[in-house]
Image (cartoon, grey):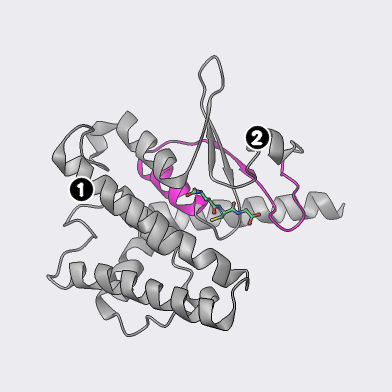
Amino acid sequence: MKLYIAQATCSLAAQLVANELGLSPELIHFDVHNGTTSNGQSFTDVNPLAYVPVLELNNDASDRLTETTVVTSYLADQHPEAGLIPAAGTLERARYDQLLVFLATEIAQKHIPLMRKLLTSEGAEWTRNKLVKAYTELDQRLADGRTYITGDKFTVADAYVWGTMWHERSGAKIDHLKNLMAYVARVEARPSAQKALKDEAELVALHRSRAAA
Ligand SMILES: N[C@@H](CCC(=O)N[C@@H](CS)C(=O)NCC(=O)O)C(=O)O
């Protein structure tokens, strides 16, 4: 399997899930600044929409999956014994998918125009308020002392929350959300998260050094 990633982006969630499952996809770095990849492939051939994560499967057709929620859920569904996601077709899974879509639309995608400074000041304020509201919802879930976002078990959603904690870059003020902050630190302390950060940093450095040579 190949996993296309970019630095400090939502692809960290896919890396973390792969690590939790003991998988070792070949990582390929897409440099969002200059459009190159660490293996020299044209990234728009890989994903015409030009974003990560992209998971390329080892099947005959080398099928590719995009969308963070789909990539992470697919990996978790392939390894039900790891318990990283509820079984497909259950009400529990429908509620779970509801949470993943909430994370994708109300958090991850809200950050992007802020980080890229694409909004008017009125638009930026509206979007930051939406982000604070969404993060407050997560903080309230955690207020009952649970370890992870859906309970005491680590799941795919935790990887996604952690992989999209871009509040500092987007200027959303959420440091007062103490349950959330303590929780994110717990996720980040997991060996799978530390490995994701390390693998990403090493690959980015390799890509840059090859480009400079
Ligand atoms: N709908 C996609 C969006 C993924 C996305 O926004 N990826 C960003 C990083 S988090 C990206 O690759 N951006 C490319 C760029 O900025 O050029 C998903 O949910 O996975």
Q: Amino acid at mark 2?
A: Val
Query: Nearest the camera: 136 or 160?
Result: 136
Specify the quadrant of the image occupied by residue 9: bottom right
Residue lying at the far top of the rendered structure? 60
Give how far across and how far down residue 176 sits, in percent: 32, 85
Q: Amino acid at mark 1?
A: Arg
> Closer to the N terminus: mark 2 or mark 1?
2
Disc 1 residue crowd, few under 14, some 14–19, many 20+, Cα 10 Å: few
Q: How many marks?
A: 2
**How far across and down, in percent of the image, does residue 117 sit?**
62, 73
Q: Please name whichever residue, 33 or 146, is drawn nearer the observer in this view of the structure.
A: 33
Q: CA distance from mark 2 to mark 1?
A: 32 Å
- Residue at point 15% right, 40% down? 91
Disc on res. 46: 2
Tell me if residue 146 is in the magenta stretch.
no
Q: Is 33 included in the stretch rendered in magenta?
A: yes
**Where residue 167 sits: x, y (%)?**
46, 74
Q: Position of residue 10 (x, y in %)?
A: 49, 54
Q: State if disc 1 and disc 2 touch (CB < 8 Å).
A: no
Residue occupying image coordinates x 41% and y 44%: 19
Name the residue that disc number 1 marks: 95
Range of magenta residues: 11-38
Q: Secondary structure at mark 1?
A: helix
Q: Secondary structure at mark 2?
A: helix
Q: Residue at x 56, y 83 (%)?
A: 121
